[in-house]
């Protein structure tokens, strides 16, 4: 929230962490730190920048959604299904979504990416035992 305020980005968070599950808080922090870094970067070029976080339990799944405005579309790599990195140093950057997917798959889940001309949404599903 503080970082969003410092960057002039509107921020709304409705976050529930399922304490009675097998989901490790460190894994959730990997997802959130990578997703928020990407979201703040995507929102930075918008006229009215915003980032929204929604995390909730739905039956045997824990869902995390991060949505942000975008000023231009993101190119999706056909092979990986992930956006292509916009980092200048492609060898040491651009692994955020791959790391998020790796955590999701650890919990037998995956990620889904949706975008339109104004917004980008990352949805992460983790299965709860």
Image: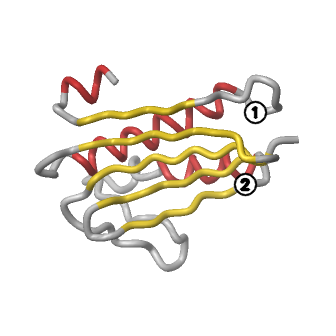
Q: Nearer the viewer, residue 94 or 51?
A: 51
Pick whichever of labels 1 and 2 is earlier in the sequence: 1
Instruction: Name the foreground residue: 123 vs 59.
Output: 59
Instruction: Between residue 53 and residue 80, name the one nearer to us.
Output: 53
The x, y position of residue 92, in whole percent, is: 40, 47
Residue topped by disc 2 = 109
Query: At x 32% / y 60%, what residue is drawn?
Result: 119
Identify which residue is drawn at 45% across, 46% down. 66
Is 84 in front, or is 24? 24
**Mark 1 element type:** loop
Say the numbered circle drawn on residue 99: none
Q: CA distance from mark 1 to mark 2?
A: 12 Å
Within 10 Å of disc 1 (Cα), the crowding (few <14, some 14-19, many 20+) is some
Q: Quadrant of the N terminus?
A: top left
Which residue is at the far right? 129
- Left or right for 52, reference 125: left
The 10 Å Cα crowd at callout 2, few under 14, some 14 to 19, many 20 or more, is some
Rendered position, 91 above or below 33 = below
Q: Is residue 64 above or below residue 119?
A: above
The relative height of residue 18 versus residue 114 in the rendered view (above or below) is above
How many labels, in total?
2
Residue 87: image location, x then y, percent: 29, 53
At 49% from the left and 33% from the top, the residue drawn is: 14
**Residue 40, position in %: x, y?**
29, 41
Position of the C terminus by quadrant: top right
The residue where tag 1 is placed is 23
Q: Judging from the image, what secondary structure is the residue with disc 2 in?
A: loop
């Amino acid at each position: 929230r503080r970082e969003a305020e410092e960057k002039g980005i509107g921020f709304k968070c409705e976050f529930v962490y399922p304490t009675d599950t097998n989901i490790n808080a460190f894994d959730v922090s990997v997802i959130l730190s990578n997703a928020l870094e990407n979201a703040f970067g995507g929102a930075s070029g918008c006229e009215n920048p915003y980032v929204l976080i929604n995390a909730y339990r739905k039956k045997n799944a824990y869902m995390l959604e991060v949505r942000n405005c975008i000023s231009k579309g993101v190119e999706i790599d056909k092979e990986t299904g992930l956006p292509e990195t916009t980092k200048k140093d492609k060898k040491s950057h651009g692994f955020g979504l791959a790391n998020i997917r790796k955590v999701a798959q650890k919990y037998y889940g995956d990620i889904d990416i949706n975008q339109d001309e104004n917004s980008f949404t990352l949805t992460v599903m983790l299965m709860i035992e």
